[in-house]
Image (spheres, rainbow, N blue to C red):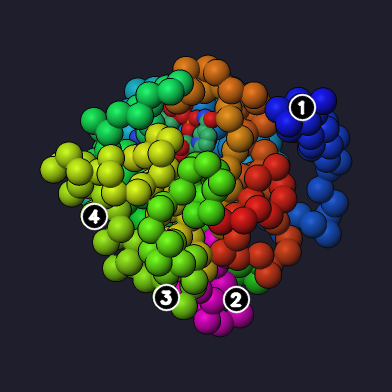
Amino acid sequence: MDKRERAKARREKRRQEITLLRTIPYSDHQRWWSIDTIAVVTGANRGIGFDIAHQLAVHGLTVILTSRDAGVGDEARKVLQERGLTVFFHQLDVVDPSSIKVFAEWVQQDFGGIDILVNNAGVNFNHGTDNSVEFAEQVIGTNYFGTKSMIQAMIPLMRPSASGARIVNVSSRLGRLNGRRNRIGDVTLRKQLENVDTLSEELIDGTVNKFLEQVKDGSWTSCGWPQNYTDYSMSKLAVNAYTRLMAKMLSDRPEGQKIYINCYCPGWVKTAMTGWAGHTSPEEGADTGVWLSLLLDQLVTGKFFAERREINF
Ligand SMILES: NC(=O)c1ccc[n+]([C@@H]2O[C@H](COP(=O)([O-])OP(=O)(O)OC[C@H]3O[C@@H](n4cnc5c(N)ncnc54)[C@H](OP(=O)(O)O)[C@@H]3O)[C@@H](O)[C@H]2O)c1
């Protein structure tokens, strides 16, 4: 068996293990949530986000399905409600501060806060072997700055509870700092981003802004950025770094007001984003995000996961 076949066999084995794990119901002891638990999912009108919303609702939570397009979002809400699930809809464009503000006020007024935030909304404009940065600003703006804006807007709304509130960021292995085939060439910068003591909002924002400046002046190709889907990889690298930074910043909250934040890679999933290529279904791609949202182990924060296992940043 060559390397590629071995990887395929490993993937298939893990897939089967997870299929099995998903058939095991949560016990009463594990179910810290109820219908009063409120989960918000961004970009949930289709793809992985729709399946995360679906699965959380099937587990018995109240889900707020959000979408930047009100028409398709409300249709998605209807599909789930017709299955007897408790799902509400609200418009939410994660790159529009006024949309986030209106959403936050509505959530506060109608629900009194939230317990889970899944930052799923994302864009990518490259397929196959392309590596265009034509839409770099939109990619970084949505995937990183949109995620960051939602985290900042939702933290004040996260309700105190013994189980803790949770934030799950849908990221990608393409954003790994030490990926073998796709990483930042500048070792010093990589080390700064890796070390949680040197990690800061200024460093993360400064890094993506420097990349965007180089995209504008055309010098980005020779500056040692990741080689594959460079804009997308940088956006997810920033999401990962921000996840670790926020975990550190949130770690000193008192008992009863804890917020746990993690990120995960859904794998290569058959959605519009990949042109329906990929190894797995949106349902499977949603699995680790749902598992993390419902995790009982409260010590897990600031980590990166794939297929229900921790992986390196
Ligand atoms: N598919 C994969 O193989 C893969 C792998 C790794 C990570 N991911 C990540 O998984 C997440 C979901 O992707 P997907 O594969 O399900 O792709 P998708 O089917 O294209 O769904 C992306 C979702 O994000 C929404 N969105 C985009 N910009 C938004 C904005 N400004 N505000 C609110 N929503 C916005 C889209 O809304 P519209 O319908 O209005 O466009 C759509 O609902 C993304 O974060 C992606 O980066 C996917």
Mark before the other along the chain sequence, 4 or 2: 4
Q: Which mark is residue 280?
A: none
Q: Residues within 10 Å of mark 1 (few under 14, many from 20)?
A: few
Give the residue at mark 3: 198
Foreground residue among 40 and 298: 298
Q: Which residues are magenta?
A: 248-261
Which type of secondary structure does the marked residue at label 3 adopt?
Answer: loop
Instruction: Indicate which label's residue lies in the foreground, 4 or 2.
Output: 4
Instruction: Say which quarter of the image contains residue 164.
Output: bottom right
Residue in the picture at 60% in, 76% down: 256
Q: Is residue 290 above or below residue 245?
A: above
The CA span between labels 1 and 3 is: 40 Å
Which type of secondary structure does the marked residue at label 2 adopt?
Answer: loop
Mark before the other along the chain sequence, 1 or 2: 1
Q: Residues within 10 Å of mark 2 (few under 14, many from 20)?
A: few
The CA span between labels 3 and 2 is: 29 Å
Mark before the other along the chain sequence, 3 or 2: 3
Give the residue at mark 2: 256
**Three-letter amino acid code at the position of disc 2:** Gly
Mark before the other along the chain sequence, 4 or 3: 3
Q: Is residue 256 magenta?
A: yes
**Three-letter amino acid code at the position of disc 3:** Thr
Horizontal side of 288 relative to 185 (left or right) equals: right
Marks 1 and 2 in Cβ contact (< 8 Å): no
